[in-house]
Image: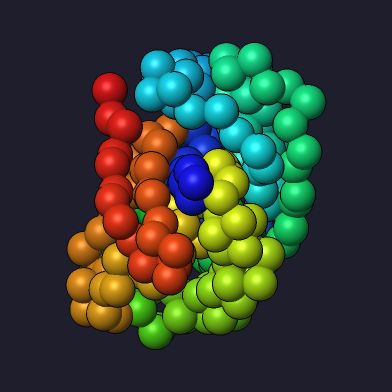
Amino acid sequence: MSRTLVLVRHGQSDWNLKNLFTGWRDPDLTEKGVEEAKAAGQRLKAAGLHFDLAFTSVLSRAQRTLSLMLTELGQEGLETIRDAALNERDYGDLSGLNKDDARAKWGEEQVHIWRRSYDVPPPGGESLKDTGARVWPYYIHKIQPKVLAGGTVIVAAHGNSLRALIMALDGLTGEEIVVQELATGVPVVYRLNADSTVASKDVLSA
Ligand SMILES: O=C(O)[C@@H](CO)OP(=O)(O)O
């Protein structure tokens, strides 16, 4: 029984590089992002992982990251389910704004609250709690059953949709998740027990 779940945040996007709030906007990967995705695939291969199913969002940066990893793994044709439930948190009115310009306008503290607090949404957007409200049911109903059936499953998604998932898997509180960051292109490998609790967690960093 493999019961393995791998989470990977997409490689650097063009808007990560430009320091813009991205959310549901759809920039492509940068060259660095492409290299990060390939390196993630190589690390998964070196760890001996072979996947039964993939999940990703409907956004290009996550889909392309998945496709680049699967090419490295020699699994280009892997069955893949794409769903907006795994999209990045919606940044609302901040989408497309420069993060430093936002700090200059609203102050460092307010921008940090919008970016990292658990339940304060940015104007017109989603808080991490709101993001979890769509990610957690999707995980419980669609992803977890495949893992508990013994599968090896990869999820290529986004900084905040994956932080919401990690909060649930690791049993973190709203205060504890605030300081958790997720690097681009770094696979996090969970092995689950039959009762769905986490048996082990390994971060495959460079
Ligand atoms: O802009 C975004 O959508 C996210 C992820 O890049 O940024 P933040 O780190 O502010 O949550």
The picture places residue 91, in percent across and down from the top left corner, at 55, 66
The picture places residue 66, in percent across and down from the top left corner, at 62, 33
- Image height check: is 113 above or below 82? below
In screen coordinates, is 104 left or right of 125? Answer: left
For the point 27% across and 23% down, which residue is it?
206
For the point 75% across and 42% down, which residue is it?
80
Residue 136 occupies which quadrant of the picture?
Answer: bottom right
For the point 26% across and 59% down, which residue is it?
180
Farthest residue, direction bottom: 119
Q: Is residue 15 visible?
A: no
Residue 104 occupies which quadrant of the picture?
Answer: bottom left
Q: Is residue 170 visible?
A: yes
Between 73 and 196, the one lying in front of the other is 196
Q: Give the number of marks.
A: 0
- Image height check: is 42 above or below 125? above
In screen coordinates, is 157 left or right of 110? Answer: right
Between 7 and 147, the one lying in front of the other is 147
Between 40 and 123, the one lying in front of the other is 40
Colour convention of the picture:
rainbow
The picture places residue 45, in percent across and down from the top left corner, at 47, 19
In screen coordinates, is 114 left or right of 13? Answer: left
For the point 63% across and 24% down, which residue is it?
70
- Image height check: is 67 above or below 162? above
